[in-house]
Amino acid sequence: MNTLHFKYAVEVERTGSITQAAENLFMGQPNLSKAIMELEETLGFQIFERTSKGVIPTDKGAVFLVYAKNILASIEKMEALSDKNSAAQALGVAFPRSLYIASAVKKMAAELDFNGKIRLNIRETNSVQIINSVAAGTFNLGIVRYRLLHEKYFMDYIRDKDLDVIPFWEFDSMVLTSERHYRGVEKISYQELGGMTPITFGDESIPYLSFGEVRREAKSPAADKAVFVYDRGTAIELLQTLPDAYMLTAPVGKKELEKHSLAQKKCEIPNERTKDVIVFQKGYKLTEIDRRFVDILSEIKNETEFDLR
């Protein structure tokens, strides 16, 4: 009997949905359904009852899930006793595609002793995926970004996932552009953005809002122009290449701007006040490396705010 299947079953129970559990576990729904069916065949009874609203445990399934959780908890405790894990320099963090956070990850990695054991688990993605992956235990820490306009949606979703939250940074979004195309320009007006090409991340998601609603809210002044990307590297390349391209981002420090030949401009944009928060599972105690990473984040944030003065 594969204990990995126990983890799958526990996640299905937690979410009440095969689809959501598969997304949280970063696997295909057919593969997860097959794994649950194989586990049920091995046990000789049905763990879940499929309903129009999702899945719920059967009577025997509920008893099995209690045992499964106890077994998984015991395995975690045994692994914690291992010298291999306790000696490892470990950091697991998911965050939005952001230059200042990527800089903190790079600085954190540079401080690690690569002669020793290192376990780094790093992912850049959208905020909903960050919340789901931290809730699933794939990452210990997550940095979630949202506009204050949507704070209620995100806070409700974070509470639904039973995560703790530490507010980190609240800021006005900056307009990121090519340095050579906008050299000498101190400020860009909201009306000027209408003649420029917006670059946005195409997988942006807001809890409880449909994909169409998210896209409508994200509409730029130039409704006939749109470039959607899914990684930070491509976004930077396009900003450097397209003469009228821009992105709305968190403030960026001078070093990163110079490194990528970019410039950032202030712009009074309606409803663009934004917040970054740190999330982690309830009961999780930040490790020494976790705390050092947050310290580095704070240092870079403070340096960036100083650059903006």
Image (cartoon, rainbow, N blue to C red):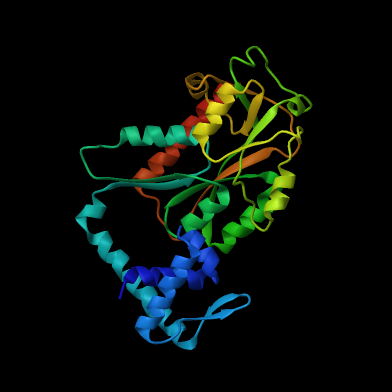
| Residue 164 horizontal/vertical position (percent) | 52, 56
- Comparing 301 with 216, the one in front is 216
Q: Is residue 74 left or right of residue 272?
A: left
Q: Quadrant of residue 236?
A: top right
Q: Quadrant of residue 66?
A: bottom left
Vertically, is 139 above or below 108? below
> In which quadrant will I find the C terminus?
top right
| Residue 151 horizontal/vertical position (percent) | 66, 50
Vertically, is 294 above or below 72? above
| Residue 152 horizontal/vertical position (percent) | 68, 54
User: Measuring 29% from the left and 68% from the top, which residue is drawn there?
Assistant: 75
Q: Is residue 31 left or right of residue 243?
A: left
Can the viewer see residue 92 in this picture? yes
> In which quadrant will I find the N terminus?
bottom left
Q: How many marks?
A: 0
- Comparing 109 with 15, the one in front is 15
Q: Quadrant of residue 183?
A: top right
Can the viewer see residue 281 in this picture? no
User: Measuring 45% from the left and 45% from the top, which residue is drawn there?
Assistant: 123
Q: Residue furthest right?
A: 191
Q: Is residue 178 left or right of residue 284?
A: right
| Residue 185 horizontal/vertical position (percent) | 68, 15
Vertically, is 215 above or below 22? above
User: Measuring 44% from the left and 66% from the top, which residue is drawn there?
Assistant: 31
User: Measuring 43% from the left and 72% from the top, which residue is drawn there?
Assistant: 34
